[in-house]
């Protein structure tokens, strides 16, 4: 027979006091164990997402069709409409809860016949140089324009010149992207104003045309187009504007230094037409627990017409479509509603992003997170986040989950042009940030084609986006302050 042991106060009380002192430690240990289990679970889900994208991905196949079967998708073009129809059909094939088209009126600018330009050192002595009209530019007269050249490094330098030095001449904006900046988007931002606003500034001083050095870090023969604006100038004062390749810009600048009396000739046949009807393409998986909370992933379906828009932004579109497919394929059902939006008209008007945000506000939709891919289909390096410090602190807790995939550059900053109009709702905005060193070799140029896409890099980007969406859906982030006009 086992004797019954009855504890007395001398043995029990010290044990109770010891337990009380260690309760916080025990609680912390339990929480740590729970957190470790959660991290292991998250790591397993993310591993499955990457493996599925790299072994069963559809993004490369979709981009192949967009690029090689449809081609450049300038807003208002037949190709843009074909892209709308194709992506809607593919999204419907994924078995989403809903797929629809959102009507939006977009500008229709037509390039016309191929541009032509040359440098004339003296009558009969010419060198042809590659140029292309800037998006939104007017045409030259039928016979083209030939005039003397004034070279400047930017709008500020131009505005310091007396009118008599500019009137009747072609202004040549030759400020290059800053090669010493590691962030190539910063280099782009440092000189793109001369492309966008150079013609308006030159016209005010009586110039007859504008030539702008292409936004490109390497020397090549590809002129890079892009949007430009005449601001509030009356139509009668609009002058033609074109981009010149970086090799062409170097030749023009050198020739000018040797002979300031040279002439430049260019001819282009572009024109602006009436707005036409187009569409944002939208598909969604309805949330299983909080369907009123909407997460968006997207890119812009339109592109410039010189290449086929594989990097800008066919890659972002197919990666965004793939986010929804990857989550369905891996068996993850989002708690919040997940929506893919393929925006129309980012390149020359931002009509699609603006229309989507307006309709979201009108219908009272609650957007909590938006992620955009519009920096090319290169190797993903991380994300930039437009959010509060509190939200970013939480986001940084997720960073170790991405480090095995070498995606570890998390910064606060900009997100994306098309999701930007959603900002007044007070949501977290994010942008996928691939390696940017080669992006501006292709941006807005004839060589932005499917052969410049690396399949593995594209699929890694899609998996990276899907993983961030999964983490936001599971954990959420601290509320953002609602901006004026938002919820």
Image: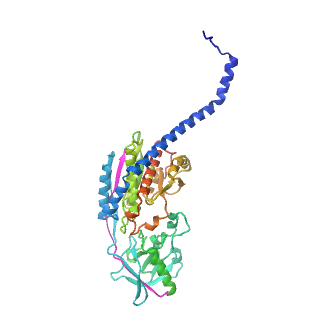
What residue do we see at 52% from left, 80% from top? Answer: 161
> In terms of depth relative to the viewer, which is nearer, 13 or 276?
13
What residue do we see at 69% from left, 23% from top? Answer: 14
> In terms of depth relative to the viewer, which is nearer, 287 or 214?
214
The prevailing secondary structure element of the residues shown in magenta is strand
Q: Position of residue 242 (x, y in %)?
A: 41, 75
- Which residue is at the far top? 1
> In terms of depth relative to the viewer, which is nearer, 419 or 54?
54
- Does residue 290 lie above or below 58 as drawn? above
- Which residue is at the far bottom? 123
- Does residue 133 lie above or below 314 as drawn? below
Boundaries of the magenta span: 259-285
> In terms of depth relative to the viewer, which is nearer, 41 or 193?
41
- Does residue 55 lie above or below 289 as drawn? below
- Does residue 200 lie above or below 103 as drawn? below
Q: Is residue 340 visible?
A: no
Q: Is residue 207 visible?
A: yes
Q: Position of residue 387 (x, y in %)?
A: 52, 51
Residue 142: quarter of image: bottom left
Q: Is residue 141 magenta?
A: no
Q: Position of residue 425 (x, y in %)?
A: 46, 50
Rendered-image quadrant of the N terminus: top right
Q: Is residue 284 magenta?
A: yes
Figure label count: 0
Residue 244: quarter of image: bottom left
Q: How is the image coloured?
A: rainbow
What residue do we see at 43% from left, 47% from top? Answer: 49
What residue do we see at 29% from left, 53% from top? Answer: 89
Q: Position of residue 204 (x, y in %)?
A: 46, 77
């Amino acid at each position: 027979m086992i004797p019954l042991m009855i504890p007395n106060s001398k043995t029990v009380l010290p044990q109770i006091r010891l337990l009380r002192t260690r309760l916080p430690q025990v609680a912390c240990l339990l929480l740590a164990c729970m957190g470790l289990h959660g991290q292991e679970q998250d790591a397993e889900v993310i591993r499955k997402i990457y493996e599925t994208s790299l072994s069963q991905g559809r993004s490369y196949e979709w981009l192949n069709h967009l690029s090689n079967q449809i081609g450049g998708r300038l807003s208002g073009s037949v190709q843009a409409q074909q892209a709308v129809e194709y992506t809607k059909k593919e999204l419907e094939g994924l078995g989403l809860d809903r797929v629809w088209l959102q009507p939006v009126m977009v500008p229709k600018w037509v390039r016309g016949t191929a541009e032509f330009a040359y440098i004339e050192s003296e009558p009969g002595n010419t060198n042809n140089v590659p140029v292309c009209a800037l998006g939104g530019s007017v045409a030259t007269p039928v016979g083209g324009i030939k005039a003397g050249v004034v070279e400047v490094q930017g709008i500020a330098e131009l505005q310091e010149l007396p009118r008599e030095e500019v009137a009747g001449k072609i202004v040549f904006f030759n400020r290059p992207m800053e090669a010493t900046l590691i962030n190539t988007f910063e280099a782009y931002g440092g000189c793109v104003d001369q492309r966008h606003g150079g013609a308006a500034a030159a016209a005010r001083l009586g110039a007859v045309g504008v030539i702008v050095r292409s936004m490109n870090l390497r020397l090549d023969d590809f002129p890079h187009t892009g949007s430009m604006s005449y601001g509030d100038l009356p139509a009668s004062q609009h002058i033609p504007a074109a981009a010149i390749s970086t090799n062409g810009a170097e030749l023009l600048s050198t020739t000018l230094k040797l002979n300031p009396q040279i002439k430049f000739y260019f001819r282009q046949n572009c024109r602006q037409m009436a707005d036409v009807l187009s569409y944002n393409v939208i598909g969604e998986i309805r949330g299983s627990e909080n369907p009123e909370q909407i997460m968006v992933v997207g890119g812009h379906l339109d592109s410039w017409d010189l290449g086929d828009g594989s990097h800008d932004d066919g890659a972002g579109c197919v990666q965004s479509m793939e986010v929804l497919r990857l989550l369905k394929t891996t068996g993850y059902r989002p708690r919040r509603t997940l929506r893919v939006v393929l925006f129309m008209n980012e390149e020359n008007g931002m009509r699609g992003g603006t229309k989507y945000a307006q309709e979201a506000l009108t219908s009272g939709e609650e957007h909590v997170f938006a992620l955009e891919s519009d920096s090319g289909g290169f190797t993903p390096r991380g994300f930039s986040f437009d959010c509060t410090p509190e939200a970013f602190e939480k986001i940084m807790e997720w960073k170790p989950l991405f480090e095995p995939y070498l995606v570890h550059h998390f910064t606060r900053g900009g997100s994306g042009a098309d999701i930007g109009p959603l900002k007044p709702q007070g949501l977290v905005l994010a942008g996928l940030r691939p390696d940017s060193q080669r992006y501006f070799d292709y941006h807005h140029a004839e060589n932005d084609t499917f052969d410049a896409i690396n399949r593995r890099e594209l699929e890694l980007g899609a998996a990276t986006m899907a993983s961030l969406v999964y983490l936001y859906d599971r954990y959420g982030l601290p509320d953002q302050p609602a901006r004026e006009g938002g919820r």
